[in-house]
Amino acid sequence: MNNKLFVGNLSFQTTENELHDAFAAHGTVMEANLMVDRMTGRPRGFGFVTMSSPEEAQKAIDALNGAQLGGRAITVNIARPREERPGGGGGGGRGPRREYSGGGGGGRRERY
């Protein structure tokens, strides 16, 4: 069993210190991180807590899953490994990149 926990449904006002303190009551917290949006810097409503052992992680899950933190019922479970995602941005599924130049005119084309 892993000792890294996913914590979801967090209030956007919850701080890393509050997250740490909530879990510290159930064992030794090695690390507590809140995820923030890269563009805006705002909290995303979830985070990760690493406990010192799998037994402490299970104890924290049993005690805190569904418990209130910051006025919300939080979700606590074992963190799953991050899934590999294809690189690059969305391209609309068009295949190889093509360069387009110029623009289409509106009306009729004259033949010469």
Image (tube, grey):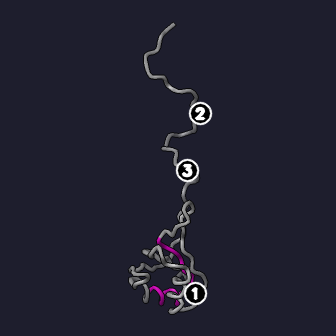
Q: Identify the element where label 1 is drawn.
A: strand
| x then y, percent, for residue 20 | 55, 85
The residue under the point 43% across, 86% down is 64
| x then y, percent, for residue 101 | 58, 29
Circles 1 and 3 in contact, beta carbons < 8 Å: no
Q: Amino acid at mark 1?
A: Val
The residue under the point 49% across, 76% down is 6
Disc 1 or 3, which lies upstream in sequence? 1
Task: State the mark number for residue 89.
Answer: 3
Mark 1 is surrounded, within 10 Å at the Cα level, by few (under 14), some (14 to 19) or many (20 or more) other residues, namely many
Q: Identify the element where label 2 is drawn.
A: loop
* Part of the protein shown in magenta: 45-61
Which residue is more in the foreground, 108 or 75?
108
Which residue is more in the foreground, 11 or 80?
11
| x then y, percent, for residue 1 | 52, 82
Would you identify the image quadrant in which residue 17 lies? bottom right
The residue under the point 48% across, 88% down is 60
| x then y, percent, for residue 102 | 56, 26
Task: State the mark number for residue 29.
Answer: 1
Q: Is residue 46 magenta?
A: yes
Task: Measure the C-alpha gap from mark 2 to mark 1.
Answer: 52 Å
Name the residue that disc number 2 marks.
Answer: 99
The residue under the point 45% across, 80% down is 76
